[in-house]
Image (cartoon, rainbow, N blue to C red):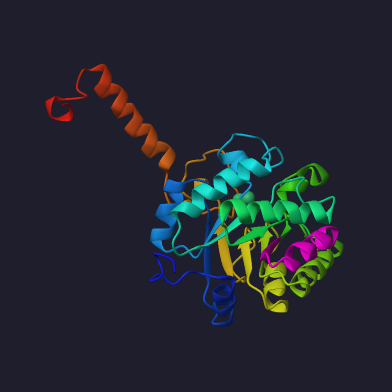
Amino acid sequence: MSVHSHIKKVTTHVLSEMKMRNEKIAMLTAYDYSTARILDSAGIDVILVGDSASNVMAGHESTLPITLDQMIYHGTSVVRAVNRALVIVDMPFGTYQGNSKEALASAIKIMKETSADAVKLEGGSEVIESVNRILSAGIPVMGHLGLTPQSIHKFGTYAVRATKKEESDKLIEDAKLLEEAGCFGIVLEKIPAELAAVVAKEVKIPVIGIGAGGGVDGQVLVVHDMLGITQEFSPRFLRRYHNLFSEITGAVKNYIEDVKSFDFPNEKEQY
Ligand code: KIV
């Protein structure tokens, strides 16, 4: 029995019940222990250890460079902090696309080494063999359709996806395929709100949107973006709840000034 057994843990079944009750699901990314602790104690339903760590933690231009071991490092840090939220770890680029046996090995490594609750991977029909094999090992899988950042070199831009019929038809088919395979949920990124609402109606599993409007079952944002730590990234869908960049800058400037002016530490701040 867990020492935290008095807390009702969010499971994939809880998310499914939330969809049935029309209760919205709140999801945010986290990559480290301290942030995950704050999000979990604030009552977030789902924490995604996103491969956006590649951008916001490591400073890469894309999500492609992050490795399986780096994702596992972030995943273990987050899981150690969390009592209630469901924790999902992104499968990084190159660990599931080519070969479903390798995909399963990657997913098992993530689950064994992080103790996370589930994995997420990008794509529909192209990766369905991997999805099936991972699911057959009893590992919960979340899909991710629409703007899939691991395919940025194929798309060429981070513009809105599925605005044309051919791509929107494929997206609906892919969502159904992921549901039939047994995925417990799907992230839809940066697609027209109307299309996202259609998908959320057509599938019974929870659909979580980012830049996909309000007609879906829940929302996800990158925590650095919604807290205003990142400055340069400002898409229309992003609501900033804070401007931590300027708050932290102010605090650091005050600290520098206090050190340089001999004000810090004072007598009470020493032994
Ligand atoms: O990596 C990530 O942060 C994500 C979200 C944008 C959904 O996949």
Q: Position of residue 160 (x, y in %)?
A: 72, 54
Residue 132 falls inside the magenta stretch: yes
**Quadrant in the picture for the N terminus:** bottom left
Q: Which residue is pictured at 67% across the width and 72% down the height?
A: 197
Which sits in the foreground, 22 or 1? 1
Q: Which residue lies furthest to the left in this view?
A: 267
Instruction: Locate residue 149, reporting x and y percent.
Output: 71, 48
> Which secondary structure is most common in the magenta stretch?
helix
Which residue lies at the image location 58% right of the left edge and 82% below the top edge?
20
User: Does the magenta portion include 207?
Assistant: no
Is 102 located above or below residue 19 in the figure?
Answer: above
Q: Is residue 45 visible?
A: yes
Residue interval drawn in magenta = 124-143
From the viewer's perspective, tell me whether residue 50 is left or right of residue 136. left
In this picture, residue 74 sits left or right of residue 158: left
Q: Could you tell whether 141 is left or right of 226 in the image?
A: right
**Residue 262's spot in the image, x, y percent?**
21, 18
User: What is the quadrant of residue 136 in the picture?
Assistant: bottom right
Question: Which residue is depicted at the point 73% across and 66% down?
Answer: 135
